[in-house]
Image (spheres, rainbow, N blue to C red):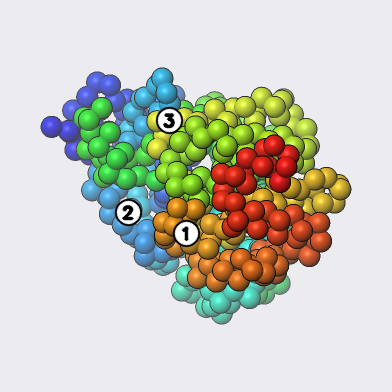
Amino acid sequence: MPVKLSQANLGSLPANVARPNYERATLTPGIVHFGVGNFHRSHQAVYLDELFNSGVGHDWAIVGAGVFDGEKVGRARLAEQDWLTTVVEQDSGHMSARVTAVMVDFLMPGDAAAIIERLADPAIRIVSLTITEGGYFIDPASGLFNPTHPDIVADAQNLDTPRTVFGIILAGLIRRRGDGIVPFTVMSCDNIPGNGHVTSDATIGLARLVNETLADWVRDNVAFPNSMVDRITPATTDRERGILAAAFGVDDNWPVFCEPFKQWVMEDRFTDGRPALEKVGVQFVHDVAPFELMKIRILNGGHATIAYPAGLMDIHFVHEAMENPLVRAFLAKLEREEIMPTVPPVPGVVLEEYCELIERRFSNPKIGDTVRRLCLDGSNRQPKFIIPTIADRLKAGGGITGLALESALWCRYCFGTTDSGAVIEPNDPNWTRLQATATAAKDMPQAWLAMEDIYGEVGNSAPFAAAFAHGLEALWTLGTRETLTRYLGDSL
């Protein structure tokens, strides 16, 4: 019978499950984290767990926070097991399980007053975020903060009861300023180019709607370090809970399964100290941008490359997509011919070796990452992971046949059926609009590129529009398999 995960049962867990060697009672909170999901618990929380296990940094424990009602479900699951999480690392020749105990509290999502009160505590020196690419109120076409979003406008008019992450953060900073307390650092851990700059723009942009003096104070006193984070972490299903119970004898409401690989590169800019994360492998650098651009274009762009052809061919798991010769070859060709040439040199990294590493990671048969997860939220991901690469290729006068085909594959996917005729369930916050536009684009491809909030100036490029239209027509007349075959044979 599996052992139910809880603080009281830590000593009763099977011997093959690693557990904290620090006393939970010795931990005190130093970080409030918004967005307690799988990635955070497999990444930032694991680094802190390793640090705490070394006997260092016990004043940097995490307090969870959130703004959406949907986050209450995850909070309830973790509350039942005293905020503990089992993290399972898997690849073809390795599987291990560990219990992390770095979270000591999880404030009720949406309880702005309680969260602001905690942010005002001098012990809290970092506020971290994993709120997904779509959580930063960015205008996709310009890539800039959108101060006209209704939620942002509402917060600016009433910061006493904010409803966005940035409203709550700003209210917390105002409290600290009034109390004479050093402001906390705001640390984004999301996959966004210049995530520190984006977070700064959102916080200062909201402050500017309140008053210029506040915005200037935030600009001059709060640190927003850029970072690059990486670890493939799929969603948790009954499959993962069953594997954990069978292989390790642990009953966990919300375990996290992930690959063994993890990476965190960060600027060393903090207002009031930080954990000694360099002791557990975090790389602190002067400029994160080269690492970040490499990861976003090669890894995240690579995910987009394999996602839509695999989805159209009814492939369920990511590793199964990599087992398909057409999908794997499409990734290899597009990466090396069109994506990698837009990535400048990265200190200490050989780009070809990095690309080969990405291919191995995508091929991991144990992770159970799904193609549907990779296809999710293209309206927010494409403007960050693919379209800037297209723009750079166009500026350089380089070929864009493969990138145009990737865009056509996304359009064809958003039509809502696979090549076999199976229905694709809504998989984007803007699905209704995307599906209607994809339907129009079947006969008039320019309709897709006319979404200026997504494509911006790229949609007005005649060479890109021609290549996109050709790729989309091929997908409708030949199907995904034959279209990929022709692309790979340089005959598309």
Picture quarter with the N terminus:
top left
The residue carrying mark 1 is 417
Please name the residue that numbered disc 3 is placed on.
365
How many angstroms separate mark 3 from mark 2 (CA)? 30 Å
Name the residue at 32% across, 33% down: 99
**Nearer the camera: disc 3 or disc 2:** 3
Circle nearer the N terminus (1, 3): 3
Spot occupied by residue 189 in the image (x, y as percentages of width and height): 55, 46
Secondary structure under the numbered disc 1 in the rendered image: loop
What is the spatial separation of the Cα atoms under label 1 and label 3, in whole angstroms?
A: 26 Å
Residue at 37% from the left image edge and 39% from the top image edge: 256
Pointers 1 and 3 in contact (C-beta within 8 Å): no
| Left or right: where 10 falls relative to 411 | left
On residue 345, the disc is none
State the image coordinates of residue 381 (x, y, percent, origin top left).
59, 54
Alpha-carbon neighbours of circle 2 within 10 Å: few (<14), some, or many (≥20)?
many
Q: Position of residue 133 (x, y in %)?
A: 56, 55
Farthest residue, direction left: 1
Tag 2 residue: 75
Q: How many angstroms separate mark 2 from mark 1 (CA)?
A: 35 Å
Q: Is residue 126 left or right of residue 76?
A: right
The kind of residue tagged 1 is Thr
Q: Vertical placement of 344 versus 164: above or below? A: above
Which residue is located at x 74 percent, y 47 percent?
Answer: 401
Would residue 349 be seen by someone viewing this image from the given angle? no
Residues 165 and 243: in front is 243
Determine which quarter of the picture holds residue 94: top left
